[in-house]
Image (cartoon, rainbow, N blue to C red):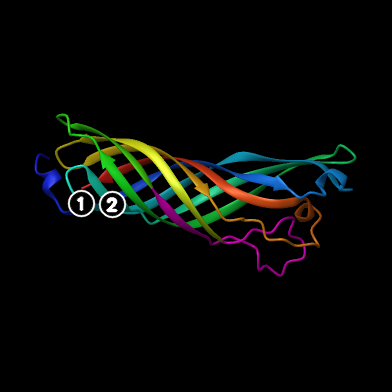
């Protein structure tokens, strides 16, 4: 594909796997709380699928837009005052809308390295903040904003580009929706999402 670098724009598909967790901060009263003595977060697996649009700005810089659906699982472990351990998971389905700046190296034959940085908007289609169910054990807000940083490689083939990539995504907004009727909610001040994503892009 020797003519590829002269294209003003091109498209592709992306799929991959992710590991995500909540970064939890406790309330000031957590140490004196009468229900839980340990609340810990853990990483859970997921997968993602999306499409890509790439706009060429110059020889070394592109802008990418990769709308995707991200299915993720975040784990929370609690131990109460009676030493009863419980492990639960929060499942999310994100409508992920990232806008990224892609900085490329010079192409060496059929290989290239690149780095990326950008921002994202996430909407969790599975969030339960407005749920009327009385048996929720924790409520999660649907909207998040964050940043993404990553690196990747491009391998050029006759009809497509194979591009493996790894990136880290950090949410800024508090995903915890306070509900004083939920004991666990009273111990948590904030939850922010961190996600590691391994993707494969197939570009045309």
- Residue receiving disc 1: 57
- x and y, in percent, of residue 81 in the image: 89, 41
Which residue appears farthest toward the left when viewing the image?
Answer: 3
Q: Is residue 119 magenta?
A: yes
Q: Residue at x 46, y 49 (%)?
A: 147
Tell me which numbered mark, 2 or 1, is placed earlier along the sequence.
1
Q: State which region is magenta.
A: 118-142
> Label 2, label 1: how many angstroms apart (C-alpha)?
7 Å
Q: Is residue 1 magenta?
A: no
- Residue receiving disc 2: 63
Element on which disc 2 rests? strand
As drawn, 90 above or below 116: below
Q: Nearer the viewer, residue 176 or 58?
A: 58
- x and y, in percent, of residue 100 in the image: 35, 50
Q: Residue at x 42, y 40 (%)?
A: 167
**Labels 2 & 1 near each other (Cβ < 8 A):** yes
Element on which disc 1 rests? loop
């Amino acid at each position: 594909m020797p003519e590829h670098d002269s294209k003003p724009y091109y498209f592709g598909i992306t799929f991959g796997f992710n590991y995500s967790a909540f970064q939890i901060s406790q309330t000031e009263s957590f140490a004196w709380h009468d229900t839980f003595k340990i609340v810990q977060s853990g990483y859970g697996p997921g997968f993602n699928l999306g499409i890509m649009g790439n706009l060429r700005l110059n020889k070394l810089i592109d802008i990418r837009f990769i709308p995707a659906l991200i299915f993720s699982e975040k784990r929370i472990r609690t131990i109460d005052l009676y030493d009863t351990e419980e492990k639960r998971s929060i499942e999310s389905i994100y409508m992920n809308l990232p806008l990224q700046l892609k900085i490329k190296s010079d192409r060496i034959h059929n290989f290239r390295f690149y780095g990326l940085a950008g921002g994202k908007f996430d909407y969790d289609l599975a969030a339960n903040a407005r749920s009327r169910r009385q048996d929720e054990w924790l409520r999660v807000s649907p909207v998040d904003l964050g940043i993404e940083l990553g690196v990747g490689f491009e391998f050029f083939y006759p009809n497509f580009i194979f591009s493996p990539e790894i990136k880290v995504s950090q949410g800024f907004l508090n995903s915890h929706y306070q509900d004083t009727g939920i004991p666990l909610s009273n111990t948590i001040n904030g939850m922010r999402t961190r996600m590691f994503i391994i993707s494969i892009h197939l570009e045309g």
